[in-house]
């Protein structure tokens, strides 16, 4: 038993499930400073997908210090900690993602990231612009509390610290999909995950049964033209003009081919690279983007129309196109098992207050937690990280230089991990 909590736990927890909520609150208060300290360290030292070496080492050392069986280098840099309770019961998985993004931080924090790394062959600034640093810290805190309860647990907890949620580098495998291939979900009965949300106020939890987040397919289009002097475009085939037409034409798929009363869909071109000088029409141009869908048939239609529009638009300009779809990421819909969601909803209402639990519409963001939840029943929720004194209209977006979360929201994340685990074990043992 973890010495930090042994004296308190020996008094508070006698037989499962007699866990005193008051004593749990003491543990959450006690761990909060460490969670904040870990988060700030990770925020100052972000690492890109499949390159989370430092983060993984810190996590592995922490889990080992708690007496867990620890596996490292899972799906490249992933870490798995296994905590076996004293009594038989279900196997519960808790997941946190570890990777950062190629974004330059603009928020003036004492622990602001100044890290520069290499992404797709280019030097780029790196920032935790989506809150994965908070996820790692929260799950480390939950691991410490649950390890202190080892002698009273009816079941096993598997702590999954996952790399490359934002997608592995081109040409590499990674993330939850690779973890599933490597057998991480073998023997698991249920999996829980969470995401801090900069647009949801601290103290609140957002959830949705069934489809919670969209399926995603990223793409790369390479347009092949003919190089010419910029002063004589009639001597060449211009992939730049072709790209402009492709971007506009792709938007007609959602507006004209998708049955939007059925489900949402999104097509976004996020990057265009072509040419080196103002007076040279380039020979080739690269376009990168993402597709989001909730419905399998709509996804198939969208992909079909995508290929038709890109190829025909290129041909109309005398160019050709090479389409890679999906390119590097292809996550299914993040699906919350309805029965598991209904079973655990009272837990969420108890720890946050029923008035702070929000049933939300599906969101077009995507999450590779979906691969875990495709293997076993899963539940994924959003935990608020928006400061209470900031107006709703001033919410900052994830994946931007101004991304910011209030660290006071992390304690609820720790409580969510711990209470979902304990309540699920109690429910399973009473079946």
Image (cartoon, helix red, strand yellow):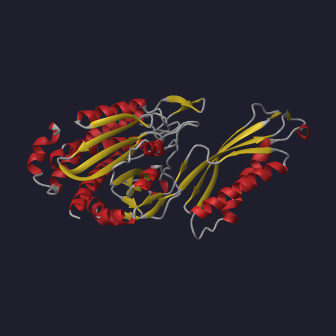
Image x and y of residue 116, in percent: 51, 29
**Res 71 → quadrant:** top left
> Of residues 385 and 151, which is closer to you in this image?
151
| Residue found 36% across the figure and 63% down from its top | 341
Marks counted in the figure total 0
Image x and y of residue 367, in percent: 48, 51
> Of residues 419 and 39, which is closer to you in this image?
419
- Point out the residue furthest to the left here: 11
Of the 4 image quadrants, the one containing the N terminus is top left
> Of residues 109 and 135, which is closer to you in this image?
135
Does residue 274 show up? yes
Whether residue 264 sits left or right of residue 174 in the image: it is right
69 lies above or below 305: above
Of the 4 image quadrants, the one containing the C terminus is bottom left
Whether residue 23 sits left or right of residue 56 in the image: it is left
Does residue 129 show up? no
**Res 238 → quadrant:** top right
- Point out the residue furthest to the bottom here: 261
Whether residue 38 sits left or right of residue 370 in the image: it is left
Image x and y of residue 256, in percent: 70, 65
**Res 293 → quadrant:** bottom right
Image x and y of residue 180, in percent: 43, 46
| Residue found 28% across the figure and 61% down from its top | 347
């Amino acid at each position: 038993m973890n010495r930090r909590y042994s004296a308190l736990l020996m008094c508070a927890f006698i037989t499962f499930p007699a866990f005193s909520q008051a004593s749990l609150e003491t543990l959450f208060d006690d761990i909060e400073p460490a969670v904040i300290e870990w988060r700030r360290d990770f925020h100052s030292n972000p690492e890109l997908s499949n390159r989370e070496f430092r983060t993984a080492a810190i996590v592995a050392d922490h889990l080992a210090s708690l007496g867990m069986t620890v596996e490292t280098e899972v799906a490249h840099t992933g870490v798995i900690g296994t905590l076996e309770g004293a009594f038989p019961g279900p196997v519960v998985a808790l997941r946190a993602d570890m990777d950062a993004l190629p974004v330059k931080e603009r928020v003036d924090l004492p622990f602001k990231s100044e890290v520069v790394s290499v992404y797709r062959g280019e030097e780029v600034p790196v920032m935790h612009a989506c809150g994965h640093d908070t996820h790692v810290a929260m799950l480390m805190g939950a691991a410490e509390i649950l390890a202190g309860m080892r002698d009273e647990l009816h079941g096993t907890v598997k702590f999954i610290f996952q790399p490359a949620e934002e997608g592995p580098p081109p040409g590499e495998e990674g993330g939850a999909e690779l973890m599933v291939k490597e057998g991480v979900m073998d023997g698991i009965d249920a999996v829980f995950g969470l995401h801090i949300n900069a647009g949801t106020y601290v103290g609140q939890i957002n959830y949705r049964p069934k489809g919670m987040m969209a399926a995603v397919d990223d793409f790369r289009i390479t347009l092949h033209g003919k190089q010419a002097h910029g002063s004589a475009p009639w001597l060449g085939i211009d992939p730049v003009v072709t790209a402009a037409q492709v971007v506009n034409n792709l938007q007609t798929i959602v507006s004209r081919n998708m049955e939007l009363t059925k489900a949402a869909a999104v097509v976004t071109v996020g990057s265009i690279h072509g040419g080196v000088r103002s007076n040279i029409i380039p020979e080739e141009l690269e376009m990168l983007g993402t597709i989001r869908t909730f419905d399998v048939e709509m996804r198939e239609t969208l992909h079909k129309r995508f290929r038709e529009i890109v190829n025909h638009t290129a041909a109309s300009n005398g160019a050709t196109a090479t389409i890679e779809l999906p390119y590097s990421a292809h996550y299914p819909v993040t699906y919350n098992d309805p029965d598991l969601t209904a079973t655990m909803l009272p837990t969420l209402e108890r720890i946050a207050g029923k008035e702070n639990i929000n049933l939300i519409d599906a969101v077009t963001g995507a999450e590779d937690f979906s691969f875990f939840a495709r293997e076993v029943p899963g539940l994924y929720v959003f935990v608020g990280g928006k400061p209470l004194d900031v107006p709703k209209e001033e919410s900052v977006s994830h994946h931007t230089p101004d991304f910011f979360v209030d660290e006071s929201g992390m304690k609820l994340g720790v409580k969510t991990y711990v209470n979902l685990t304990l309540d699920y074990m109690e429910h399973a043992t009473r079946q």
